[in-house]
Image: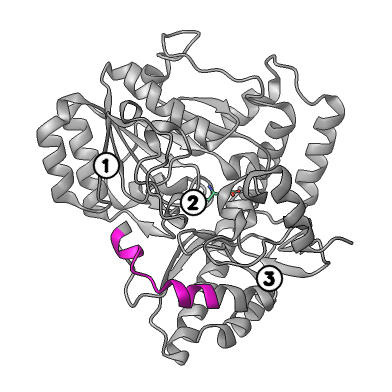
Amino acid sequence: MASNSELFERAARVIPGGVNSPVRAFRAVGGTPRFIARGEGAYIVDAEGKRYIDYIGSWGPMILGHGHPAVLEAVQRAAIEGFSFGAPTEREIELAEEILKLVPSMDQVRLVSSGTEATMSAIRLARGATGRHKFIKFEGCYHGHTDALLVKAGSGLATFGHPTSAGVTPGAAADTVVLEYNNVEQLEAAFAEAGHELACVIIEPIAGNMNFVRASLPFMTALRRLCTQHGALLVLDEVMTGFRVGLGSAQAHYARLIPGFAPDISTFGKVIGGGMPLAAFGAKREVMQHLAPQGGVYQAGTLSGNPVATACGLATLREIQKPGFFESLSAKTRQLVDGLKAVAAENGVPFSADSEGGMFGFFLLPELPQNYTTVMTTDKERFNRFFHAMLDAGIYLAPALYEAGFVSAAHSAADIDATLAAARTALR
Ligand code: HOZ
């Protein structure tokens, strides 16, 4: 049996940095990434046979835990029928119908293979539909790795201290306007100056790539009002929050608090694929009609609407609609977050934490931060010590303080208790 470090050394010879996505490399926290051999419900088991309670859940998708029987069965059946046809299938319609039933801000949805594709296509669609070039994004929000969006982004870029990626040309980023998250004044000023040139504003409604930072109600209200006033489209990036913070996603949460609130375009990923490469973007019919083959905005993909991925997504979406699913998931996640706060208070450690549905975040800061600059003031050394002590105790948290965490339906009360018991020693 090869150890994690042997596998990492071997991987580094053939894969840059030994990983296929940078945050997996443990660079922010140091040490050796765990090579995962298998997942079972709320747990993952590494190459050395050590079991962990998994709070990453593949960075969001595994809302039912690993190897849910209904999902497994649907995937196995679909795989036998065929892996990929590059032609339409009935299951794509079923998945689109299921998504649209749960997200009333959209009439139509286009299936793609990754969150990056979804956000990239949403920006192109907004530009094509409005005939404008510029768009606003917010510092610390990560919308995938397309050039124009890799400016002052969170997640892996924050981890490595390069908020804007090398290789993004000034031309590619020239129409990207970056503003501070939750800063209404800055937003008003930007619209006053360039509102007529803006195709859209893209935002993570709960930013999960600078840990967990909610858009405040005044900020979201201003955003909706300004977009409408100036003819810019509001793009909610729900790749992370979609079907994860609640059945109607983050937009339903804001719609409950802000009368009439709805985005113009939404992007989804992660949960809608249940762990398979599947994502989507959607909007009202008048916006979506700009997409090829009806309209002039081109977008395509060989594996888009893949039959195995749609089976996985569909089975997952059906499970999360069962009565009481989100009530139970939210309660468990709150139990974890409240427990961590209590442990930190016992240990006299400055700590704040928040959750919505099955998504959570915590900071070694006395108050929840409202923007990226404040997130960056977190005590990194203490976070890294905490991370490693938890890992040793069999608790698998995100290996960077800029990432949100995820609880699944498979996590039990005993798992949460075990996590809090480990935190009692680790959080010092
Ligand atoms: N974009 C993810 C972090 N927010 C990382 C994905 C991965 O490494 O799997």
Q: Is residue 248 visible?
A: yes
Residue type (three-letter) at the residue carrying disc 1: Val
Q: Is residue 29 above or below residue 114?
A: below
Name the image colouring: one colour
Queried whether the magenta region covers residue 374, the answer comes back as yes
Residue type (three-letter) at the residue carrying disc 2: Gly
Provide the secondary structure element on which disc 3 rests: loop
Q: Residue at x 34, y 49 (%)?
A: 254
Quarter of image, res 231: top left
Quarter of image, res 229: top left
Quarter holding the N terminus?
bottom right
Q: How many marks?
A: 3
Provide the secondary structure element on which disc 1 rests: strand
Residue at which label 3 appears: 412
Provide the secondary structure element on which disc 2 rests: helix
Nearer mark to the viewer, of 2 and 3: 2
Residue at which label 2 appears: 156
- What is the residue that sits farthest to the right in this orientation? 1
Tell which of 385 and 362 is nearer to you. Answer: 385
For disc 2, does the CB lie below 8 Å from ligand 1?
yes
Q: Is residue 287 left or right of residue 418?
A: left
Queried whether the magenta region covers residue 90, the answer comes back as no
Nearer the N terminus, badge 2 or badge 3? Answer: 2
In the rendered image, residue 130, in percent from the top left (x then y), is placed at 28, 19
Q: Is residue 182 left or right of residue 333?
A: left
On residue 428, the disc is none
Q: Residue at x 64, y 25 (%)?
A: 305
Q: Which residues are magenta?
A: 373-385
On residue 178, the disc is 1
In the rendered image, residue 285, in percent from the top left (x then y), is placed at 41, 19
